[in-house]
């Protein structure tokens, strides 16, 4: 069966159940005056939950999603949800956008119009894209895999099949977080189809080849490795448990909406360019829309399994391996440890590197104008 039009709608009883669970939250104690030192502070979480119950309107976010063209199709035995917006220009370039964790296609709601209809926002209509933005397997309105092996490598294979089904035999690809891993695999394994790739993150598992014949790490590269290792010590507990025992933590996160909010929103605070005040970058409504999407689809467990699965086949390069399709990099200053250019160039054909003035890990949502402009400029030469 081919692609079917899809309309986002969550049953009212699911939302009523969410409200009951929020009302019955059993709160933990905390150390007085501890702020964020021990994790999510109780006062802010209570405030967020109160807003979720009394002011947040999921139906408005359904309307925002349904304002775009939503579809579901069967790819590799899984139902895959995706947004597909045609470009408004003389010859739109097909562009595959892939999100990461703990994000979703909601990250793309502001950037999509900038890419599909640049002329309406002061840009050049010849820069328009046909944008395909799928929900990763096990995320949002895509099916949850029931078997092993759903790695970022496998997802790249599925995305290639999706683009073929849509009639796009040549296309560009862009991603951050897990989307960067999927996009890297596309560039590695399908160079005959992928025109170029654009990344706003380098896969967290990326390690350059340092065996015989490789040059030693420079002082700049050594400093990055030390920064990355320090970050993993202080901020990497979530990743360690998600790539080792995801099913254990999924039990609590799938049962407690307050717990789920704490687990996800903490990452939006820590990984964004917000100076420690998450609502400087994201409104409560934006934060809770993303959390609610995970809640109503019961995909927190299936989403974090990607960490364990992809650990079985991480992005690794041999002595002569490299991504041979051209690569553009947008480096946002508050991105979680991001390698310097010379580190990335060991295995990526970097033809454009942009140092952004602001923004962090959730670039499409934080700085949609900056990211869209860089994507348009980079892909202009491949049209």
Image (tube, rainbow, N blue to C red):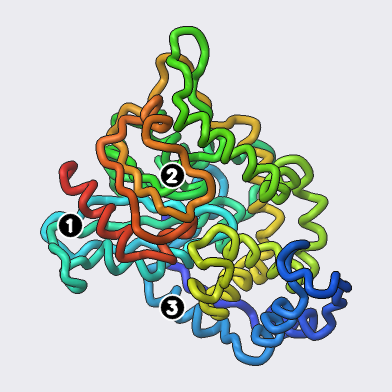
Q: Secondary structure at mark 1?
A: helix
Residue 173 x %, y %: 35, 45
Residue lying at 26% horizontally and 64% vertically, measured from the top left: 116
Name the residue beneath numbered marker 2.
159
Left or right of residue 110, residue 195 in this image: left
The foreground one among 41 and 23 is: 41
Front tag of 2 and 1: 1
Is 230 positioned to the left or the right of 379 in the image? Answer: right
> Mark 2: which secondary structure?
helix
Q: Is residue 43 above or below residue 247?
A: below
Pick the front one: 180 or 82? 180
Out of 73 and 333, give the one closest to the viewer: 333
**For residue 376, what is the image quadrant?**
bottom left
Q: Give the farthest residue toward the top.
A: 212
How far apart are the alpha carbons under marks 3 and 2?
A: 24 Å
Task: Reply above or below: 209 against 137.
Answer: above
Q: Are marks 3 and 2 in contact (CB under 8 Å)?
A: no
Between marks 3 and 2 in the image, the one whose residue lies nearer the viewer: 3
Which residue in the protein does label 3 denote? 64
Tag 3 secondary structure:
helix
Q: Nearer the viewer, residue 17 or 349?
A: 349
Kindly identify the residue that appears in the image at 18 percent across and 42 percent down: 382
Q: Is residue 260 above or below residue 332?
A: below
Instruction: Return the mark for residue 127.
Output: 1
Residue drawn at (57%, 54%), measured in percent from left and top? 101
Whole-angstrom CA distance, mark 2 to mark 1, is 23 Å
User: Badge 1: few (under 14), some or many (20 or more) residues near its Cα, within 10 Å?
Assistant: many
Mark nearer the N terminus (3 vs 2):
3
Visible residue check, residue 73: no
Task: Nearest to the eye among marks 3 and 1: give it.
Answer: 1
Distance between the alpha carbons at the discs numbered 3 and 1: 24 Å
Quadrant for the C terminus, please. top left
């Amino acid at each position: 069966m081919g692609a079917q039009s899809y309309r986002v709608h969550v049953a009212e009883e699911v939302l009523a159940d969410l409200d009951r669970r929020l009302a019955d939250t059993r709160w933990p104690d905390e150390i007085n005056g501890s702020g964020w030192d021990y994790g999510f502070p109780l006062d802010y979480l209570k405030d967020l939950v109160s807003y979720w119950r009394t002011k947040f309107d999921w139906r408005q976010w359904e309307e925002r999603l349904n304002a775009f063209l939503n579809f579901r199709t069967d790819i590799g035995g899984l139902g895959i949800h995706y947004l597909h917006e045609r470009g408004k220009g003389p010859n739109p370039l097909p562009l595959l956008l892939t999100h990461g964790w703990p994000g979703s296609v909601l990250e793309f709601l502001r950037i999509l119009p900038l890419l599909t209809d640049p002329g309406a926002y002061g840009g050049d209509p010849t820069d328009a894209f046909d944008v395909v933005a799928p929900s990763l397997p096990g995320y949002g309105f895509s099916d949850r895999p029931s078997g092993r092996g759903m790695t970022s490598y496998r997802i790249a294979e599925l995305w290639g099949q999706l683009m073929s089904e849509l009639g796009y035999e040549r296309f560009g690809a862009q991603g951050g977080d897990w989307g960067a891993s999927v996009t890297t695999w596309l560039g590695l394994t399908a160079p005959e189809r992928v025109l170029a790739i654009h990344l706003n993150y380098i896969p967290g598992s990326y390690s350059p080849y340092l065996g015989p014949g490789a040059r030693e790490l420079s002082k700049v590269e050594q400093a990055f490795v030390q920064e990355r290792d320090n970050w993993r010590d202080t901020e990497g507990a979530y990743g360690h448990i998600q790539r080792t025992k995801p099913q254990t933590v999924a039990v609590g996160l799938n049962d407690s909406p307050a717990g789920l909010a704490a687990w996800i929103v903490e990452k939006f605070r820590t990984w964004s360019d917000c100076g420690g005040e998450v609502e400087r970058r994201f409104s409560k409504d934006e934060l809770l829309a993303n959390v609610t999407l995970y809640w109503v689809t019961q995909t927190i467990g299936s989403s974090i399994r990607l960490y364990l699965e992809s650990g079985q086949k991480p992005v690794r390069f041999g002595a002569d391996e490299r991504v041979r399709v051209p690569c553009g990099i947008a480096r946002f200053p508050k991105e979680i440890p991001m390698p310097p250019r010379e580190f990335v160039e060991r295995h990526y054909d970097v033809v454009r590197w942009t140092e952004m003035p602001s923004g962090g890990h959730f670039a499409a949502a934080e700085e949609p104008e900056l990211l869209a402009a860089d994507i348009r400029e980079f892909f202009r030469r491949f049209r």
